[in-house]
Image (cartoon, helix red, strand yellow):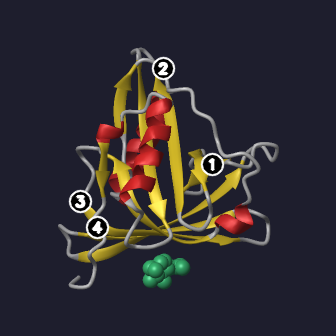
Amino acid sequence: MLKFATILLCVCLFRGVIGQSISSGKCPQVKVQDNFDIEKYVGRWYEQERLFFAFELDQKCVTAEYTLQQDGSVQVNNTGYVKLERKFSTSLGNAKAEDPKVPAKLGVKFFPEQPRGDYWVLSTDYTSYTVIWSCGPITGVDANIQLGWILTRESAGLSASKMAEIHALLDGFGIDVNKYKTTEQNCNES
Ligand SMILES: *[C@@H]1O[C@H](CO)[C@@H](O)[C@H](O)[C@H]1NC(C)=O
């Protein structure tokens, strides 16, 4: 699974928007959204929080636009303002459920030859928030690589109480919510 780590790292350095974190032990046992409906899920989302990764390029105003394709897969358009470069950067990818019986477990890739990385929807109400999770073991060591995002339909995000509910959900799976960092969404001056 070292490959998994390398690929994630490459995607990470390339995109600069992925949150990623290395933790000891096995991946947390998570539960995904029941009866996930991709048609209600597509459209625009704003990144509110991501699992912090020290080496990621600093981006703000990160959005994800998901567009349903004719083959049932989803076009992914991740766009963010790279503070260091003072310009917006876009990465286009493709997501689809690898097992149609578990539609909330999507796989996403940003290069054609790349194996799909996990994009699991743990919880969404389709109209205000979504909680995305990805985790893979690292062979040879007792550790795993975690990626996580909380996206919202409104750039202004969620109420503190709703955010606390989402953090409680993650905490219940044994995910360290203290590693989640807020993504700036103040984009008027950029
Ligand atoms: C991706 O999203 C950005 C920001 O919304 C937009 O400017 C760009 O045209 C989109 N690219 C594609 C190929 O849809």
Q: CA distance from mark 3 to mark 4?
A: 7 Å
The numbered dot on residue 58 is 3
Sequence-first tag of 3 and 1 = 3
Residue, disc 2:
26
Secondary structure of the residue carrying numbered label 3: loop
Left or right: where does residue 176 sit relative to residue 123? left
Question: What residue is shown with label 1?
Answer: 107
Picture layout, residue 11 above or below residue 63? above
Label 3 – label 1 distance at C-alpha: 25 Å
Q: Disc 1 or 4, which lies upstream in sequence? A: 4
Question: What's the residue at 20%, 75% (across, down)?
Answer: 86
* Quarter holding residue 180: top left
Whether residue 72 can be seen here: yes
- Which element is circle 1 on? strand
Q: Which mark is residue 60?
A: 4
In depth, the one of 9 and 118 nearer the eye is 118
The reply to whether callout 4 and callout 2 are in contact (CB within 8 Å) is: no
Q: Mark 2 or mark 3, which is nearer the start of the sequence? A: 2
Q: Amino acid at mark 3?
A: Asp
- Judged by depth in the image, the label closer to the viewer, 2 or 1, is 2
Residues at circles 3 and 4 in contact by the CB criterion of under 8 Å: yes
Q: Quadrant of the C terminus?
A: bottom left
